[in-house]
Image (tube, grey):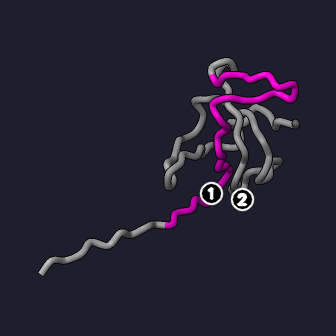
Amino acid sequence: MVEKQHEHHLSVSLEPLDDFLLIEPGDAETWTRSGLIVPAGADQGCRTGIVTAIGPDANGIEPGDKVLFPKDAGYDVRVGAGTVKLLRREDLIARVVD
């Protein structure tokens, strides 16, 4: 008797604790309002991303905010087919206002 293997798809979501934030990093390239393309390496060690979830102690920031943070800050976490960034509120440099 041959046993069939069943695929198990795990539906994983992350809920940040304390003052941690979950950020979806921006694309490798950024377009300015005037249409200029800024390559990822041109931003001198910073990245942008969209805050997707916040811990209960993360003040002054909301899901949906676009933020600027150091490239080496936090942790890269693979979730499904993508990678998100998990970092502390104190690691943010600025909120980006378009």
Kind of residue indicated by mark 2:
Pro
**Tag 2 residue:** 56
The residue tagged with tag 1: helix, strand or loop? Answer: loop
Q: Earlier in the sequence, mark 2 or mark 1?
A: 1
The reply to whether discs 2 and 1 touch (Cβ–Cβ < 8 Å) is yes
Horizontal side of residue 36 vs 20, given as left or right: right
Comparing 79 with 58, the one in front is: 79
Q: Quadrant of the C terminus?
A: top right
Q: Residue at x 83, y 47 (%)?
A: 60
User: Image quarter for residue 38?
Assistant: top right
The residue carrying pointer 1 sits among few (fewer than 14), some (14 to 19) or many (20 or more) residues within 10 Å by Cα, namely some
| Residue 20 visible here | no
Residue 45 picture location, percent across and down: 64, 22
Report the disc number at residue 3: none
Q: Quadrant of the N terminus?
A: bottom left
Horizontal side of residue 90 vs 75, given as left or right: right
Residue 87 picture location, percent across and down: 62, 43
Report the disc number at residue 17: 1
Residue 81 inside the magenta-drawn segment: no
Q: Please give the range of residues in magenta.
A: 11-40
Comparing 1 with 25, the one in front is: 1
Kind of residue indicated by mark 1:
Leu
Q: Vertical placement of 61 versus 32: above or below?
A: below
The residue tagged with tag 2: helix, strand or loop? Answer: loop
Residue reaching furthest bottom? Answer: 1
User: Image quarter for residue 33?
Assistant: top right
Residue 13 picture location, percent across and down: 57, 62
